Amino acid sequence: MTDEIEISIPVRVDYVQLVRAVVGSLAATNPELSTARIADLRLVISEALTNAIRAQEKNSISERLTVLCKLTDLAVEVEVRDKATGFEVDSIPDLPPTESPERLQHERGLGLSIMREMSDGLEIKSGPDGTVVHMTINSSNSNNS
């Protein structure tokens, strides 16, 4: 089984919930994906999409964002693509562990950390023409879970 959808949205945060609902509904068609993993998927999509919207707003870029979702028997793969000027992925510092008191000093900048923790795979490619965030959520019958 392989199902794919592509969603193109305006640079507006009020579309994040729509994308979460559509991708979550597609993921729910795979009986191997638990409700908890679909909730994780919705959260990582929110983080990636919100970051992409903010980046384009900051750079006054009105071009639509693209979300690609591919569902297979083994996983859900999601890509969020923006047209912002990009950023140096390696320059984003790791956050202190969640149990560390220093973590309380970090109210912002949790998005990448959340995406790393809650997805089974995260790849970010960023450059002058935009950023592509590729996330994978494995189903229970995947060898990687």
Image: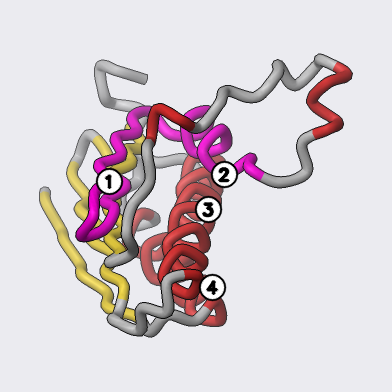
Tell me the crowding category of disc 2: few under 14, some 14 to 19, or many 20 or more residues within 10 angstroms, Cα based.
some
Pair 2/4: label in front: 2
Disc 3: which residue? 47
> Gap in Å between the C-alphas at discs 1 and 2?
16 Å
* Residue range highlighted in magenta: 109-133
| Residue 45 place in picture, x, y as percent | 45, 55
- Whether tag 2 and tag 4 are in contact, CB under 8 A, the answer is no
- Whether tag 1 and tag 3 are in contact, CB under 8 A, the answer is no
Q: Amino acid at mark 2?
A: Gly
The answer to whether 3 is drawn above or below residue 95 in the figure is below
Decide which of tag 2 and tag 4 comes sooner along the chain. 4
Tell me the crowding category of disc 4: few under 14, some 14 to 19, or many 20 or more residues within 10 angstroms, Cα based.
few
Query: Which color mode does the image show?
Result: secondary structure
Disc number at residue 111?
2
Along the line of sight, the residue nearer the viewer: 114 or 40: 114
Element class at badge 4: helix
- Whether tag 1 and tag 2 are in contact, CB under 8 A, the answer is no
Disc 4: which residue? 17
Q: Residue at x 49, y 38 (%)?
A: 115
